Image (spheres, rainbow, N blue to C red):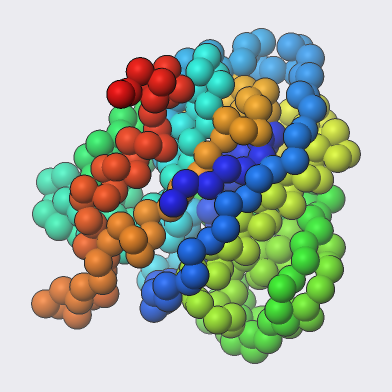
Amino acid sequence: MIRRVTPLTILLLGLTVLAACSPSAPYWAPPTPTVYYAPATPAVYIPPELLPDGQVQPEATTVLLMGIDRRGQSGRTNNTDAMMLFRLDPQGQVIAILSVPRDLYVEIPGHGQGRINTGYAWGKRDGTGGLALARQTVSAALGVPVEHAVLIDFKVFVTLIDAIGGVDVDAPYGISDPTYPDGGIGYDPFYLSAGHHHLDGATALKYARTRATPGGDFTRTVRQRQIVVAARDRVMNLNLLPDLIAQSPQLWSTLQGAFETDLTLGEIVGLVVAASRIPADQIKTASIDETCTQPWVTPGGAAVLIPLQDKINALVTDLFSSPQTAASTP
């Protein structure tokens, strides 16, 4: 199902949400989500001198965004825990965002069948490069060219939410998670009452990451989107984007080691600014969800999702088609 969301710092703040991830959990089929219509938002002007390259991204670009938990990484794998495709078309004035389930069972180029989130790890091992093989894997599975990739961890999420002064959320239910993991092998209990809250980066991460709610991964995804919208609202309402752009070199330096990308700082800033100039009604999101997949357990006992390729192809075509293409389709 395709949904529409508001513009502004979709890329910059979308990156933060990808860090809200943890090991796999049972899938739960929620009711069909309702469509969210964003309120109209004014355009944001960014002085050209604040752009490191002096330019806004002019060409259509698809970026694979991935999140990984590297805290206490001794003994951990390099499997990514969250994946999202972000396509920005400045000339067509369209943004498309596709959430990809990490357990999607696909062909990993050169390594046979496996979960789609293992592409990065295989690339790190075989010399292909983690980002490169992750891009190849997703591109082959979905039939979409992927030009760039970004990998981030929890530190990015916390830093960027704190950089905008936190976010406001309305929790629809109370949360009691006495076994929320800390940065090592222990626990950092998380409790939150239902209702309105202002969350700093660390608390927003817990809110987005906890599983101690009905629905497991599916309801957690809803909370992650809630954080993105709350962050966008704060940036827009307080006109923070120019300041964030001005601070980007410092943020880039501070976050070194907490992310990996084949984009330059100037390219990232250009993408963010270009995204901020696209109208709200031209931004669409979709998920490869239970309507496009079939649960299966491999002979080795791994719980995976078999892609229903026809349905995925139709979803991807609908989401990533340009207005011109859609208009010309009979």
Residue 246 location in percent, x, y? 78, 27
Vertical order, 160 against 178 (above or below): above
Q: Quadrant of the C terminus?
A: top left
Q: Nearer the viewer, residue 292 or 145?
A: 292
Which of the 4 image quadrants contains residue 75? Answer: bottom left
- The image position of residue 93, as x and y in percent, is 56, 21
Q: Is residue 316 above or below residue 105?
A: above
Looking at the picture, how far across and down is residue 54, in whole percent?
A: 66, 10
Is residue 310 left or right of 244 when viewed as pictured? Answer: left
Q: Answer yes or no: is residue 45 visible.
A: yes
Residue in the image at 26% along x and 43% along y: 313
Total numbered labels = 0
Closer-to-camera residue (160/216): 216
Residue located 50% across and 77% down the image: 215
Is residue 206 rendered to the left or right of residue 293?
A: right
The quadrant in which residue 191 appears is bottom right
Q: Residue furthest front?
A: 330
The image shows residue 294 at horizontal and vertical percentages of 25, 67
The answer, for residue 132, to whether it is visible in the render is no
Residue sitting at x 71%, y 73%: 172
